[in-house]
Image (spheres, rainbow, N blue to C red):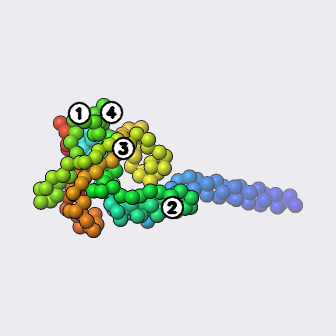
Amino acid sequence: MKRFIPIIIAAAVVTTGCAEIREYVQIVRNDSLSSAYRKELKRWTRSETVYSSFETRLKVVATWRSAAFQRVYSAEYDRVYDGSVRLDVTSSPGMEFLFYAYTPNREANDFADARSIWKVYMVTKGGERFMPVDLRRIEDVTPAMEEFFPYINIHHGSVYTVTFEDADKQAEGKTPQTCNFSLVFTSVLARAELEW
């Protein structure tokens, strides 16, 4: 019996060690969102970071909330919540974008303010410019929103929605790969252009 004790102890250590390794693997994995959703999010999202003198002047990340993206988002939301929460994904008229913006000076992160130093507009490859009909800051960013849009970091930046009317006719039925427009963010601090 005494000679089996070291084997039993070794087996217990190996088994316990493997369990701990499995727990660490589970901690590292982020499988709350499907890889299909993450792929579609990446497909409909653009980002740019503007630097000056080794300082970040502006970081902006935007997701085009097209009808196709909204269907994928709704399906993923339904999957995550097992159909217990119905998500209203009725699209607004026009083209809508969700965007996250970081500026080093929090007071300069005022895209939705009527007196903002920032101008946001959309321009087609042909040079046609569209001004937003609605630009608003999302004040109540939920943990669910941060999960579904992992680029959001409420401790550093702000989240907005911007909508353009009439511009949706330019992009009707197109995918991010076949569109020819840019979302432009410009001010005396920086300029970023996200191309679709």
Q: Look at label 4 and name its amino acid.
A: Arg
Lower sequence index among marks 1 and 4: 4
Quadrant containing the N terminus is bottom right
Q: Are marks 1 and 4 in contact (CB under 8 Å)?
A: no
Q: Is residue 17 visible?
A: yes
| Residue 147: % across, % down | 46, 51
Residue carrying label 3:
159
Of helix, strand and loop, which one carries label 2?
Answer: helix
> Which element type, helix, strand or loop, lies under badge 3?
strand
Residue at image location 53% in from the left, 53% down from the top: 28
The residue that disc 1 covers is: 115
Where disc 4 sits, the SS reads helix
Residue underneath mark 2: 78
Q: Earlier in the sequence, mark 3 or mark 1?
A: 1
Q: Earlier in the sequence, mark 3 or mark 2?
A: 2
Q: How many marks on residues?
A: 4
- Helix, strand or loop under label 1: loop
Mark 4: give few (<14), some (14-19) or many (20+) Cα within 10 Å: few
- Measured in 3D between alpha carbons, the distance from the residue under mark 3 to the one under mark 1, in whole angstroms, is 18 Å
CA–CA distance in space, label 3 to label 2: 23 Å
Q: Which numbered dot is residue 106?
A: 4
Mark 3: few/some/many CA within 10 Å (<14, 14-19, 20+): many
